[in-house]
Image (cartoon, rainbow, N blue to C red):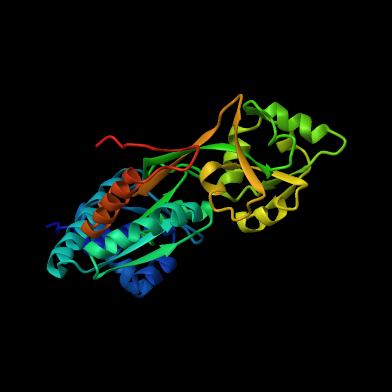
Amino acid sequence: MRHNVTLKQLRCFLAVAETGSFTVAAGRLCMTQSALTATIQQMEEAVGLRMFDRTTRRVMLTDHAGRFMAEAERVVNGFDSAVSDLLALAQGERGHIRIGAASSVISQFLVPALPHFREAYPEITISLRNPAAQQTERLVLEGEVDFAIDSKYRGHEDLDYTPLVRDCYGVVCHRDSPVAALDRPVTWADLTRSHDAPTHARYVGFSADTGIGQFLRTNAAHWPVLGGEHDEVESTTYLFAMLARGNYYSVLPALAYERNEFASLTFRELHEPRLSRELCVITRPLRSLSPSAQRLLGILRATLAAQAMPSGVSLLVADE
């Protein structure tokens, strides 16, 4: 007689499927490898199918196990979400929210919203993380943060991206720059001509592992300066200090420029073409947000709707 498949067996199955290793999965689950192997064998006996093909070097899902994996994730995540909601009800207004966000989002949006949230829910604590762009999606996928607010880096099919704000790209340069003095919309061609001039300013870009660097490499391939030799930075903190010297310029989204503290710098939106990015609330579709996280997002959206957006930034209303 076949036995019922247990939640423990599903968790073990997913751990091995995700890591491709009984050893690594056992460590993640804090159990011995022999106990994990026995649990998987019990599951295979219960369903009457082999779930993994094992070799001396790797572990692979069988075809039917690969098709079953999404259902197993849905069951486990649904159970975890239900328990989380139950605990939230039991705790009343207590809880902890873990957020990953771009620096500009933290300073421009989250920091102004937090006092309103703290006033309404003083017992809920918050962790803010500012991961590198290529790490943000992984943190959400692995459950290390409840949600993130950032632009798409690669875009993952197992994540939901709910648009929050859109901001346009523009050139940031010294106020005495010829580009800043133009009495018409600035185009990408203007930057190319400025770069070719005898006394041109030097372009400073972002490395490919940053969100801005990745976006420009994908969407601004038409601009020849980007493909040429130029300096690169990983942080706007260093960038603005370089630009303030007067012989450099860069291309940034409007929201990132708002963190600038140098009065000598200016931002001009770029046209022909006009480029913009969407900053999204990034979540896992199979794991619902806790009530406290939903409350924080509600207060964040209300705060954004009530405040004036910086030039070049517009609030997006998600379809619900």
Along the viewing direction, whichever of 12 and 99 lies nearer the viewer: 99
**In the picture, residue 125 is in which quadrant?**
bottom left
- Say whether residue 129 is visible: yes
Is residue 93 shown left or right of residue 126? left
Along the viewing direction, whichever of 96 and 139 lies nearer the viewer: 96
Residue at coordinates 81% horizontally, 38% vertically from top-left? 200
Along the viewing direction, whichever of 20 and 205 lies nearer the viewer: 205
Residue 229 in the image: state x and y as whole percent.
Answer: 79, 42
Residue at coordinates 22% horizontally, 52% vertically from top-left? 75
Is residue 247 shown left or right of residue 19? right
**In the picture, residue 201 is in which quadrant?**
top right
Residue 14 in the image: state x and y as whole percent.
Answer: 33, 57
Quarter of the figure with the C terminus: top left
Residue at coordinates 60% horizontally, 50% vertically from top-left? 209
Whether residue 24 is situated above or below residue 173 in the rendered picture: below
Whether residue 19 is situated above or below residue 154 in the rendered picture: below
Residue 9 in the image: state x and y as whole percent.
Answer: 25, 62
Is residue 225 shown left or right of residue 93? right
- Say whether residue 69 is visible: no
Residue at coordinates 61% horizontally, 24% vertically from top-left? 272
Residue 163 in the image: state x and y as whole percent.
Answer: 38, 39
Quarter of the figure with the N terminus: bottom left
Whether residue 96 is situated above or below residue 108 in the rendered picture: below
Is residue 59 shown left or right of residue 196? left
Looking at the rendered structure, the number of numbered marks drawn on it comes to 0
